[in-house]
Amino acid sequence: MVIGVGNEFRRDDGIGPEVVSRLRGRTPAELLVSDGEPSRMLEAWTGAALAVVVDAVRPGRPVPGRPHRIVVDQADLPGARPVSSHGLDLGDAIALARALGRMPDRLIIHAVEAADTGLGVGLTPAVAAAADGLAEAVLRDVQAAFQSSPPAC
Amino acid sequence: MTHRGHRTLAVAGLARVEGEGSLYVRVSGGQVEEVRLDIYEPPRFFEAFLRGRSYTEPPDITARVCGICPVAYQTSACQAIEAACGVSLPGPLADLRRLLYCGEWISSHALHIYMLHAPDFLGYPGAVEMARDHREIVERGLSLRRSANSLMEVVGGRSVHPVNVRVGGFYRVPSAAELVPLREQLRGALEISLETAAWVSGFDFPDVRCDHELLALRDPGSYPIERGTLVSSEGLEFSPADFERHVIEEQVPHSTALHARLSGHGGSYLTGPLARYSLNSQWLPPAAAAAAREAGLGPACRNPFQSIVVRAVEIVCAVEEALRLIDAYRPPDHPFIDTTPRPGAGHGVSEAPRGVLYHRYELDAEGIVRSARIVPPTSQNQGAIQDDLRSFVQDRLDLGDEPLTRACEQAIRNYDPCISCATHFLHLHMDRE
């Protein structure tokens, strides 16, 4: 499944939902938009073989539109928070999922650096320009999962 | 920021409140000189964004203000616009609106109790650590939210952002058969909600009393959720149309926040579970009323630390009401009533999980929004929270900065501030001189 995390009324925070909307009709994977609240994320991805999450990040000195791809495998040691340095709420969702045994078999995070997450509609140019590339990258991950295992994502 | 020779404390990112905000405390000579709860970004963006839109759009747009209480925003918005159009929902549609709202109460309160607040009382840094030791307890919270989400999906179309709600009612009403599976889930939720109330009533509560005036809705015979008139603990009573005559919002220095007060009544006031409960406990349905008694609550509750107990009782209430409404459900003849726009203003109030949520819209003859005003519960509570923190900190100056910071964070969580409605970023800054 693909989960686009973000709020379209907070500028670049809308990149997650935007990427998901570009995937509609292009993949049999389940598509969701979420505000990223940890228990909601858990409910969405429990039992999934693969969950791909798309989210905006706000590092100290952003390069707007720069993408990151982070793979979180079930086998990773508990307590490791690979995304905490990026300031993603996903760290909380992952930690909670581990504590409850509710991680998807595989979690891939596509994070993109945001320029502006203040109130307003519309992505800033650099982030908007990254949307298509992100959508393609997500599709590649989803297609690889479909080819290698029964579709439960 | 540091002061030479003084202890300062800065904690980045207040954990476990929705959204972000900022708290500054200055102590001098053993006295709390200043407490500032600073929040940035009131819903001015949405008020401006709504201007020029059609009267059918505010419920959908304003639902995005608060990601965890979209139904509250949709309901207050719909009621304001319906009032502007001179209509109100007939019984069966009004009941369906209440049923949907019950789902949001269950979901929001369960989230707050299990994921945000209980860890404080049990000495855990967060829900993750609590989940490692007490998996089954956290699963209880998730189960309540699952039941709530199912309810909101069947009635509202989606749990995250109900798309089925429209001015005048709904786009589609469920058949009685569609509600049947919900009954089973909600019966399970009733058991769990009673367990939740018993569980939280056993926590240790500091003996604190808040003397603020309380403001809530009242709908005699019913515990107020989706509608009512406004009442206060000091005897005020007014209709939604008079909200802006009684509630005055004032700009606070150093903040884009507005602090609210009741006209002619001086200081801050409090809205939310404590206010609702203290002003309406006699109308709780039977299982919720019993849960309140067993939890040791009297007819009113003024201890902010016990608001977690009140929220648990309100979950029982919402589950019980949902079951009653499902059992009594007869599909309405038509999913919505006609709403013809006309020039003028309309006002709507409902009890969001966090308290009274007011919307006002002014329409022109074509139904275009000329102006909008949204007053969220957390905005209204800012002053009261700040006042309570002042005495809270004053009584705990003997604590070191670290434990005092954690105690302040826990105290703020009593009010379940949804500062994503009004804020951007929070940290605690403590200045001791």
Image (spheres, rainbow, N blue to C red):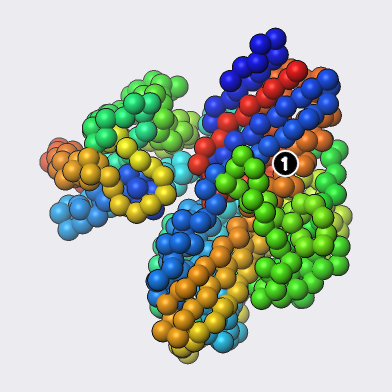
How crowded pointer 1 is (Cα within 10 Å; few <14, some 14-19, many 20+) is rated as: some
* Count of numbered marks: 1
Which quadrant of the view contains residue B227? bottom right
In the image, residue B413 above or below residue B362: above
Q: Amino acid at mark 1?
A: Gln
**Along the horizontal axis of the image, is B154 left or right of B237?**
left
Question: Which residue lies most toward the front here?
Answer: B253
Instruction: Return the x and y of residue B208 as percentages of the image width and height.
Output: 84, 40
**Along the horizontal axis of the image, is B124 left or right of B338?**
right
Residue toward you, B427 or B222? B427
The residue positioned 82% from the left and 35% from the top of the image is B391
The residue positioned 59% from the left and 25% from the top of the image is B11
User: In the rendered structure, the residue with mark 1 lies on which chain?
Assistant: B
SS state under label 1:
helix
**Along the horizontal axis of the image, is A128 left or right of A11?**
left
Instruction: Return the x and y of residue B142 as percentages of the image width and height.
Output: 52, 47
Residue on which disc 1 sits: B386
Question: Which residue lies most toward the top here?
Answer: B5
Residue toward you, B26 or A39? B26
Q: Where the N terminus of chain B falls, by quadrant?
A: top right
Q: For residue B289, say whether it is visible.
A: no
Q: For residue B404, say whether it is visible.
A: yes
Which quadrant of the view contains residue B350? bottom right
Instruction: Return the x and y of residue B144 as percentages of the image width and height.
Output: 56, 52
Which quadrant of the view contains residue A55? top left
The residue positioned 64% from the left and 56% from the top of the image is B377
Instruction: Return the x and y of residue B258 as percentages of the image width and height.
Output: 63, 51
The residue positioned 71% from the left and 63% from the top of the image is B247
